[in-house]
Amino acid sequence: QSALTQPASVSGSPGQSITISCTGTSSDIGGYNYVSWYQQQPGKAPKLIIYDVSDRPSGVSNRFSGSKSGNTASLTISGLQTEDEADYYCSSYTGSGTLGVFGGGTKLTVL
Amino acid sequence: QVHLVESGGGVVQPGRSLRLSCAASGFPLSSYVMYWVRQAPGEGLEWVAVISRDGGDEYYGGSVKGRFTISRDNSKDTLYLQMTSLRADDTAVYYCARDLGTSSFQIDCWGQGTLVTVSS
């Protein structure tokens, strides 16, 4: 299973909005509504911020939103804050009897 | 409070074995599919293995299949990863992780990770 494709880096200024794309195939993103996004601060474990394409866990800011169109999922962060600077990973279910697949990760810089 | 704590990492020579443990607290381990995920230094996340709630089904990533074994002891609320024939490219932080509840490779709880370094 090949990794999902994410941009290596994105940047934005405080208060702006950014979108991170995550491209897969019909065998993963396009075939299921089990796309999740994780935020990882340096030296820390990842944290779930979006699941089931667009749902937010309790306690996650509503500045984070997710969507999907065809084989591409997207994470949008609105009202960027300096604390949002982190690595972001997408992941998708790929069917029963196999492991899931992660994206390569995107480093967000808040300028 | 839900908590996962890994242990057992360290420095090991190529070809040797190591067993990681993950102690769960704050929830019944038996109710959740569990995963091991790893992250090589400076690299991204990689699914390593998954195990069903009762331990009857397990699946592995291609790079570890045949060398690693995931298991669980629900009576002890503990998850394991037995690693054999270790290679330099197995060097990584290994995370124990809990499924969201839908067996869908979505993780709602991660351990702090344990570093495994394979080096002579």
Image: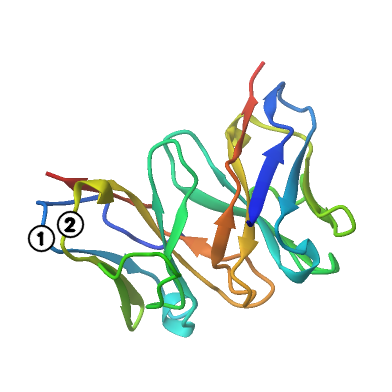
Residue depicted at 73% across the width and 52% down the height: B24
- Where, quadrant-wise, is the C terminus of chain B in this rendering? top right
Residue B60 percent coordinates (x, y) = 70, 57
CA separation in Å, label 2 and label 1: 5 Å
Which tag, 2 or 1, sits closer to the chain's start? Answer: 1
Relative image position of residue A90 (x, y in whole percent)? 41, 62
Image point 38% across, 64% down: which residue? A60
* Mark 1 residue type: Gln
Nearest to the observer: residue B27 or residue A14 = B27
* Side (left or right) of B30 relative to A110: right
Q: Is residue B106 visible?
A: yes
Disc 2, SS: loop
Residue at 33% x, 80% y is: A68
Q: Which residue is mark 1?
A: A16
Answer yes or no: is residue B62 visible.
no
Query: So how many labels did they put on this image?
Result: 2
Q: Is residue A106 left or right of residue A102?
A: left
Q: Give the residue at mark 2.
A: A80
Q: On screen, B8 above or below A84?
A: above
Q: Chain of mark 1?
A: A
Rendering coords of residue B113 (x, y %): 59, 40
Q: Are marks 2 and 1 in contact (CB under 8 Å)?
A: yes
- State the residue at coordinates (44%, 46%): B44
